[in-house]
Image (tube, helix red, strand yellow):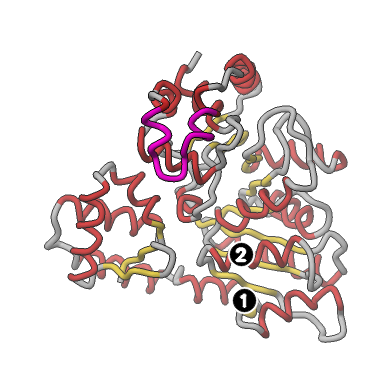
Amino acid sequence: MNNELIYQIALTRVPQIGDVHAKTLVNKYKNAEDIFKAPKSHLEKIEGIGTIRANAIKNFKEFNSCEKEIKYLEKNDIQAIFITSDKYPKRLLQCYDNPVLLYFKGNVDFNNYKLISIVGTRNNTEYGKTVCQKIIEELRKIDVIVISGLAYGIDTIAHKACISNNVPTVAVLAHGLDRIYPPENKSLAREIINNGGLITEFGTGSIPEKQNFPKRNRITAGICDALIVIESGKKGGSLITAELANGYNKDVFAVPGRINDFKSEGCNYLIQSNKANLINSVADIIETMGWSQKQESNRAKQRSLFTDLSTDESIVCEILTQNGVSHFDNIYLRSNLSYSAMASCLLSLEMKNVITALPGKTYKLT
């Protein structure tokens, strides 16, 4: 049995240790086993950990449940993807509160496709259904994975349209992979596994509790390049997901609706308040995202100009090329540079006008 995986799962189950604290520990120790074997006196000196969390780590005894989880994963062909794995969805690394561990059952590589999340009302109109299906049909033109949440309404329509059009699709779940919610979508979930996959941060035995859905929404918002909202009221999960996506510096698109249609109030609000781009077709997304062949060619030429860089600077630029806008912690984790070397490297690249510093300790190529 994979000893490191036992400790990776355990890290997600320690009381008082959330995703942000767990990442602090991973950045310090690089692997999970070392965290649990570190002296308490070392742990409690780490910023944000302190005595209470250090005690929680040292007092954790539920390793048997972690071994049981691994046996379930192996039996059901489920991958456990830790934050340091090359398989971890790189776009999520840009989010300060991204999950440390993900469970995935499926057959896609998140890091070799463009990713578009689609969210919307559970009580869609015929207009919403038609628009959603049309968008999916048009997405066949590009190498894209469509992310949604397997809920009733727009989520279900999006997943089904992807399967019909042979577009890979992934459902983000608010529970463990030992169940499906809503249960009416069990057969759809099986089709999704063969055409993409199911992903969650929740282990077996986790039920779809109310507090799990906002956590699910942050993955939907953070895992993508762009988020599309199709029909939404002014309150609800879709608007929350759009707000999260904006906070993660994602491009958000909304399908406009009639001004007297309350099921389009949310989309119209996002457009009116400049929190989303109005979308008439997938061509709008391709143009805004710079996914046209001409724009990609210009980017390649721009990258070729970055020749007068040190080895460390080249590593950072490659990370930003692959990930786009990235948080300091993401770059630090990926680069394997020391903290001081990272800080020096970023400052040097800023002085050379190769990168631009953004709010919230995030960076992008200039």
Q: Position of residue 143 (x, y in %)?
A: 52, 56
Q: Is 53 within the magenta?
A: yes
Q: Position of residue 80 (x, y in %)?
A: 55, 30
Instruction: Count how many numbered circles sit on residues in the image.
Output: 2
Helix, strand or loop under label 2: strand
Residue 144 picture location, percent across and down: 55, 56
Amino acid type at image mark 2: Leu
Query: How far is mark 1 from mark 2, CA to CA?
Result: 9 Å
Disc 2 target residue: 227
Residue 156 versus residue 7 in the image, above or below? below
Q: Is residue 133 visible?
A: no
| Residue 180, picture quadrant | top right
Q: Is residue 316 magenta?
A: no
Seen at 48% across and 17% down, the residue is 2
Q: Name the one closer to the observer, 339 or 2.
A: 339
Residue 119 image point, x, y percent: 71, 61
Location of mark 1 (residue): 276
Please tell me whether residue 59 is drawn above or below residue 11 in the rendered image: above
| The C terminus lies in quadrant | bottom left
Q: Which residues are magenta?
A: 41-55
What's the residue at 44%, 28% (across, down)? 32
Question: Closer to the N terminus: mark 1 or mark 2?
Answer: 2
279 sits left or right of 39 in the view: right
Determine crowd level at label 1: few under 14, some 14-19, many 20+ residues with C-alpha closer than 10 A: many
